Amino acid sequence: MRYKKILIAVDSRENSINVSKKGFELAKQLQAEAALIFVVDKSKAAGNPDAGIMPSEALIVLKKEAQNTLEQLIRINSWTKDVIKFMPEGLPKEDILKTAKVWGADLIVAGIHGKSGFSLWAMGSIAQHIILHAQVPVIIVPPPKE
């Protein structure tokens, strides 16, 4: 199988630099099309009505953060080819898989953020969900060793 479309899943956490680097390296080596996805997590757009911040305003801030992160990752990686940028609103573990299917990704590159123990059990892992439910191969990029 030849990988023609690589979906690189990122967020605003530090490991996204490593994830994007690995994804762009693979795209270059395989002469594949690269796309970045940053899911605007609607569950984080609750806002704070007591402080005058409505959910719609919080969502605008999250969208701007996603756009800025994608642009920054493209610059950091000195990527000169066109990059498709997906910024769906929803839940990361669902929307990454949905976007991969709709776009026709052959490979997903994602990261893991070092969650372990109770927090992994209670919150689940986006990477774990993607691995278990993806219909294409998945590469997981670990956080850097400290």
Image (cartoon, rainbow, N blue to C red):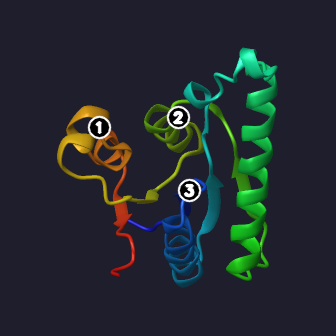
Residue occupying the point 36% across, 64% down: 139
Q: Name the residue under label 2.
A: 95
Determine whether the residue tagged by mark 2 lies in a helix, strand or loop: helix
Q: Distance between the residues labelled 1 and 2?
A: 16 Å
Determine which residue is flagged by label 3.
10
User: Where in the figure is residue 42, as x and y percent of width and height?
Assistant: 61, 27
Tell me the residue at 25%/33% (across/down): 122
Q: Is residue 93 above or below residue 56?
A: below
Q: Distance between the residues labelled 2 and 3?
A: 12 Å
* Mark 3 surroundings: few (<14), some (14-19) or many (≥20) residues within 10 A: many
Residue under numbered circle 1: 124
Would residue 55 be found to the left or right of residue 118 on screen? right
- Dot 1 amino acid type: Gly
Compute the Cα span from label 1 to label 3: 17 Å
Identity, as a three-letter code, of the amino acid under mark 3 = Val
Q: Residue at x 29, y 37 (%)?
A: 124
Left or right relative to 135: residue 87: right
State left or right for residue 106 relative to residue 75. Answer: left
